[in-house]
Amino acid sequence: MTRRLLGLTLAGLVVMAAPACAQSSEVEALRREIADLREDLASLRASLGRARPVIDLTVGHHKGSDEARVALIEYSDYECPFCMRHSRETMPLIEKNYIATGKILYGFRDFPIDQLHPQAIRAHEAAQCAGEQNKYWEMHARSFGQPSQHTPEALERTATEVGLDISAFRACLASGKFTSAIRASVDQANSFGANGTPAFFIGIIDSETKQVRITRAISGAVPFAQFAQALEAAIAQANR
């Protein structure tokens, strides 16, 4: 009798455990997501302690709807492998679902890390020089790559491909006129608590001052689903 009861008890435990096992992967996924959210919150809190996380939209390069209430600002390094992956795999989805639809305003900020990629600043300067000829985004799209793509000769080839006046482009690069602004962008990213690239900040746009009040930070080349979740939450908050 005892064996029979023990057998029934064990059988019951197996039946009860089955659903738990089936849901374990979902629970683990939720735990990871919560951990990611806590990490982002900790990063944002740290940035709040160092500097008020506000980004000025009156400077820099942006695309999307001027009527958008939410902004996504990326601080990135053109030679960073993770930045390249984000540009290749995730950015097209953000472009399609949020920028092209007018849901958000997107901005790119220079964040070359000299210690890791000492030549990357050349690519950032080249993109800024292309902006003088209204070709910033065309040059930007071709700027992610290896150091061999950022030699003076390689940059001039890219500039030719996007239709720049090469003489003006060459003079702009030689002047170093954008170097200080790029360094300032790096300093700003650091002041916000960004400790690597790519670093993203999502926030609500003040339509009068054109300042972005940061509400969420995302670190690294995370999947599109994480961006979508954060952007939808910001949009809902902006529309309250």
Image (cartoon, rainbow, N blue to C red):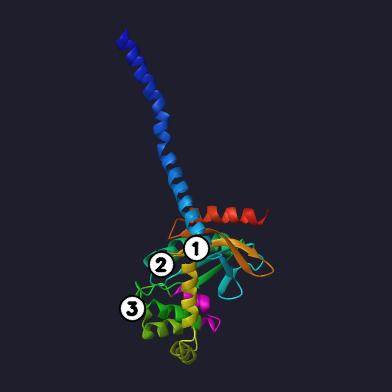
Of labels 2 and 1, the one closer to you: 1
Picture residue at 50% right of the left edge, 60% below the top: 93
210 left or right, relative to 61: right
Q: Does the magenta segment cover residue 132? A: yes
Q: Residue furthest top?
A: 1
Residue at point 36%, 82% (across, down)? 151
Q: Which residue is mark 3?
A: 148
**What distance separates the C-alpha of mark 3 from that of mark 2?**
15 Å
Kindly identify the amino acid type of the residue bearing the numbered disc 2.
Met
* Residue topped by disc 2: 84
Task: Please tell me the numbered disc located at residue 200.
Answer: 1
Q: Please state which of residues 64 and 52 is positioned toward the viewer in this rendering.
A: 52
Q: Position of residue 46 (x, y in %)?
A: 49, 59
Name the amino acid, label 1. Answer: Phe
Q: Secondary structure at mark 1?
A: strand
Q: Which residues are magenta?
A: 130-142
The kind of residue on which mark 3 rests is Ser
* Residue 129 percent location from the top left of the image: 49, 83
Nearer to us: label 1 or label 3: 1
| Image spot of residue 75 (x, y percent) | 48, 68
- Secondary structure under tag 2 reads helix
Quarter holding residue 65: bottom right
